[in-house]
């Protein structure tokens, strides 16, 4: 769904202060697992129920998240210095 509506997804990133959002798929033993990796600023907005893409994202997440799902705390961000500087300055900028 997100791939099919990529332009809508990208349009939400600034409001969310999402500098990077990557979704990985692991197919293992006949099951699919999705892993989200994000780098975002602290003041970013959450999903907005008034936007169709966010509503669909929320509904999909309800159907697919494992019980007990939690967000992991980032420990290391490994990017080449020019990329790191650009990403963090965008995500952490003052509004």
Image (tube, rainbow, N blue to C red):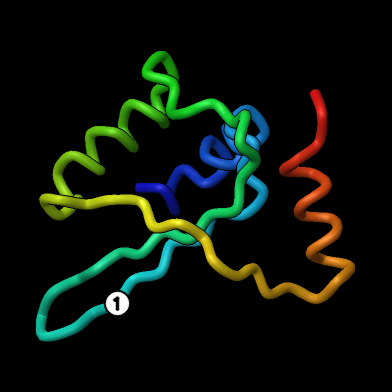
Residue nearer the viewer, 38 or 29: 38
**Mark 1 residue element:** strand
User: Toward which corner of the image does residue 53 lie, by quadrant?
Assistant: top left
- How many dots with numbers? 1
The vertical placement of 42 against 4, above or below, is: above
Question: In the figure, is residue 67 to the left or right of 76?
Answer: left
Question: Which residue is located at x 46 percent, y 43 percent?
Answer: 5
Residue nearer the viewer, 41 or 4: 41
Question: Which residue is located at x 37 percent, y 18 percent?
Answer: 49
Q: Residue furthest top?
A: 50
Question: Which residue is located at x 15 percent, y 51 percent?
Answer: 68
Question: Which residue is located at x 81 percent, y 36 percent?
Answer: 93
Q: Position of residue 43 (x, y in %)?
A: 62, 29
Q: Position of residue 82 (x, y in %)?
A: 89, 68
Which residue is tagged 1? Answer: 26
Q: Position of residue 33 (x, y in %)?
A: 24, 68
Q: Position of residue 8 (x, y in %)?
A: 53, 35
Residue nearer the viewer, 14 or 70: 70
Q: Residue furthest bottom?
A: 29
The vertical placement of 52 against 81, above or below, is: above
Q: Residue furthest right?
A: 82
The vertical placement of 30 against 47, above or below, is: below
Question: In the figure, is residue 36 to the left or right of 62?
Answer: right
Q: Residues within 10 Å of mark 1 (few under 14, many from 20)?
A: few
- Quarter of the picture containing the C terminus is top right
């Amino acid at each position: 769904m997100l791939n099919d509506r990529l332009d809508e997804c990208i349009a939400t990133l600034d409001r969310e202060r999402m500098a990077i959002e990557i979704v990985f798929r692991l197919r293992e033993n006949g099951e699919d697992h999705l892993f989200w990796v994000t780098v975002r600023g602290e003041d970013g907005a959450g999903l907005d129920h008034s936007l169709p893409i966010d509503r669909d994202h929320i509904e999909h997440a309800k159907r697919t998240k494992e019980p007990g799902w939690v967000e992991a705390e980032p420990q290391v961000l490994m990017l080449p210095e020019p990329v790191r500087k650009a990403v963090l300055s965008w995500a952490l900028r003052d509004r």
